[in-house]
């Protein structure tokens, strides 16, 4: 008898449920629900209350809507018997967080708080907490706090501590009246099961929790603000558990809403990018998974014995991706967005015209022409910093650059140089890991870009001199979430006893690989040396022209 699991992937604009077979990971049915309130970056649902610059909020009811609509829809489409579903797991954007009361009710649902923006869900890309992140970073650096090195030397404004401190500073009553600050991932699990547990992935990568050391010290929090002194025992309390842990069984109410059996095993939450790793079958060291879309997340597992320090990584967390390993994460803050920028704002009209005449899109046309060029033929070289540099320089003040233009430079040459620049940026990240005790032997890719742009993937293989394997699932994070749901169920209940077993059966990659072409590798090695020189020159303080130009804007 075939058994199934449900994975729910909570993205930025929408959530989707996917029903997968536990035999082989095949996606039987999926259903997407756009969040009715989307991303609130102008006003609260009460339209009279305007939001500040860099705010990005969400409505927690939208997350419940996804459960209410998408789960029954996949059961109906598939026609399976709900009793054959063994487990359920979710993945979420992070750090997407909210204040809740002692009963788990979001403060934004209460009349007395709903008009205060700080009572709502702060979405991962809410960047208004930057001044508070800066303050935390300065203090941590001054105090020589060890935890800072685990986050590439800087905490992000997107993360939990900056967002909580922002609430304390700007809305002390919300801070006071919050029983807990919760990751939305953990809050949704609370809705499904009635139990509140913090998953080690979001706690580790986004809230500075460490398996041995716990959170930063009480003393450190007190130094930020005396009112934060007891935060670890109060508003950050909650057991932190590894991924795949069973959070509990589906409640009677949720069983009625979804059509799934009451008591169904539900796994603790997970981060979207991280959930993809086992979905590609990756549960061991040496294999870097790249989630490639508007931006790129790079994840790699390191030895169980030793936590390594790698320049500019976003974080290292024990059990943070696959239990039993240190999980390392790094990132490029733009990739697809840079190619999209060129098409939208810089490609000439005649390219659009030709694309239209040929019934193709501009990306595809530029890719086709760029594929005819050899490495180095354009004479162009780009620094891929259109949205700053996340890894390894951790500097949002840096900006994009291209050199080598002549009067005969063509649009496809510029497009190819942008693809190459992104690949060099990834090579820099790989080298940082590889040279610091976290080997990267093979690359795995998922997300939209590997499906959209084969030339980009070949360039990545050539620039990094590594084989690249591509996900064979459209909903990679949801598949990963479903796999952790199966692990929460355990073999006795028809699931799996470990994520290793689940990955072996359900992880999926395409048969065709991208393999480096030796002569391209040779040429790109030379160009990469030039890229590295420019990278250091503009990125490490020798010439701060990018920073100055930004200041003068
Ligand atoms: N053919 C293409 N080649 C390269 N980039 C593309 C192409 N088509 C779209 N893009 C870029 O891909 C990005 C979207 O990637 P996708 O993985 O679908 O989204 P997301 O990151 O939001 O999940 C956009 O930034 C867009 O500019
Ligand atoms: O924080 C992250 C990974 O650590 C993600 O960048 C964030 O969750 C949003 O991801 P996406 O836009 O791909 O859904």
Image (tube, helix red, strand yellow):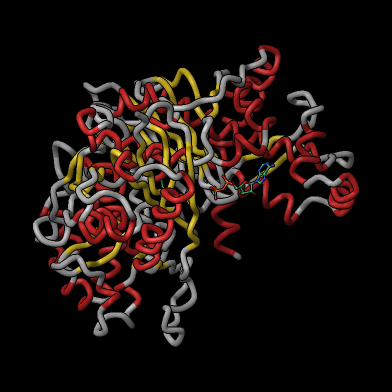
Q: Residue at x 37, y 21 (%)?
A: 504
Depth check: give the residue in front, 390 or 324.
324
Is 265 positioned to the left or the right of 75 in the image?
left
Horizontal and vertical percent for residue 330? 42, 38
- The quadrant holding residue 303 is top left
| Residue drawn at point x = 35 percent, y = 58 percent | 96
- The quarter holding residue 164 reads bottom left
Judge whether 158 appears above or below 428 on screen.
below
In the rendered view, does 345 fall on the left or right side of 44? Answer: right
* Percent x, y of residue 551: 55, 62
Residue 106 position in % (x across, y down): 26, 70
What is the x, y in percent for residue 315?
A: 33, 40
Q: Quadrant of the C terminus?
A: bottom right
Tally of marks: 0
Write the residue at 17% across / 69% down: 101
The residue closer to the viewer here, 10 or 336, is 10
Q: Is residue 224 left or right of residue 85?
A: left
The reply to whether residue 32 is in sight is yes
Farthest bottom residue in view: 48
Task: Looking at this view, name the residue that lies furthest to the top.
Answer: 518
**Can residue 313 be seen?**
no
Q: Is residue 169 above or below residue 518?
A: below
In the image, 282 versus 235, the foreground residue is 282
Query: Residue, x 23% and y 28% (percent of image)?
Result: 491
The quadrant the N terminus occupies is top left
482 versus 217 height, above or below: above
């Amino acid at each position: 008898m075939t058994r199934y699991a449900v994975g729910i992937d909570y993205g930025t604009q929408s959530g989707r449920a996917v029903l997968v077979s536990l035999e082989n990971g095949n996606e039987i049915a999926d259903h997407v629900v756009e969040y009715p309130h989307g991303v609130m970056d102008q006003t609260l649902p009460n339209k009279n209350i305007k939001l500040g610059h860099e705010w990005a909020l969400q409505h927690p009811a939208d997350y419940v809507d996804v459960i209410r609509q998408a789960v029954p829809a996949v059961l109906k489409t598939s026609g399976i018997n709900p009793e054959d579903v063994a487990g359920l797991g979710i993945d979420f954007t992070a750090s997407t967080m909210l204040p809740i009361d002692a009963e788990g009710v979001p403060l934004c649902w209460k009349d007395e708080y709903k008009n205060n923006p700080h009572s709502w869900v702060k979405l991962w890309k809410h960047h208004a907490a930057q001044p508070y992140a800066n303050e935390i970073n300065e203090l941590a650096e001054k105090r020589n706090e060890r935890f800072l090195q685990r986050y590439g030397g800087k905490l992000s404004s997107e993360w939990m501590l900056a967002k909580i401190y922002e609430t304390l500073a700007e809305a002390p009553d919300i801070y006071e009246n919050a029983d807990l600050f919760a990751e939305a991932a953990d809050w949704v699990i609370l809705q499904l099961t009635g139990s509140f547990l913090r998953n080690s992935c979001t706690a580790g990568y986004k809230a500075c929790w460490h398996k041995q050391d716990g959170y930063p010290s009480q003393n450190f929090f007190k130094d930020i603000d005396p009112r934060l002194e007891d935060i670890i025992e109060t508003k950050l309390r909650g057991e932190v558990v590894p991924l795949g842990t069973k959070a509990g069984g589906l409640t009677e109410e949720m069983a009625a809403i979804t059509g799934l059996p009451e008591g169904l095993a539900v796994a603790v939450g997970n981060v979207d990018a991280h959930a993809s790793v086992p979905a590609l079958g990756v549960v061991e060291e040496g294999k870097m998974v790249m989630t490639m879309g508007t931006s790129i997340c790079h994840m790699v597992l390191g030895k169980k014995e030793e936590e390594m320090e790698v320049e500019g990584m976003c974080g290292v967390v024990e059990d943070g991706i696959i239990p039993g390993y240190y999980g390392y994460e790094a990132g490029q803050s733009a990739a697809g967005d840079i190619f999209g920028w060129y098409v939208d704002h810089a490609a000439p009209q005649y390219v659009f015209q030709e694309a239209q005449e040929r019934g193709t899109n501009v990306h595809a046309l530029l890719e086709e022409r760029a594929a005819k060029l050899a490495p180095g033929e354009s004479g162009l070289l780009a620094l891929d910093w259109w949205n700053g540099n996340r890894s390894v320089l951790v500097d949002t003040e840096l900006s994009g650059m291209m050199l080598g233009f002549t009067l005969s430079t063509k649009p496809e040459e510029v497009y190819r140089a942008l693809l190459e620049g992104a690949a060099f940026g990834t090579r820099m990240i790989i080298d940082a890991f590889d040279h610091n005790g976290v080997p990267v032997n093979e690359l795995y890719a998922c997300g939209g870009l590997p499906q959209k742009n084969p030339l980009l993937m070949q360039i990545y293989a050539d620039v990094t001199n590594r084989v690249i394997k591509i996900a064979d699932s459209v909903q990679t994070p949801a598949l990963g979430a479903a796999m952790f749901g199966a692990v929460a169920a355990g073999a006795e209940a028809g699931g799996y006893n470990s994520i290793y077993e689940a990955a072996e059966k359900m992880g999926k990659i395409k048969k065709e690989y991208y393999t480096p072409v030796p002569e391209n590798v040779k040429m790109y090695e030379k160009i990469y040396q030039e890229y590295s020189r420019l990278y250091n020159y503009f990125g490490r303080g020798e010439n701060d022209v990018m920073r100055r130009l930004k200041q003068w804007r």
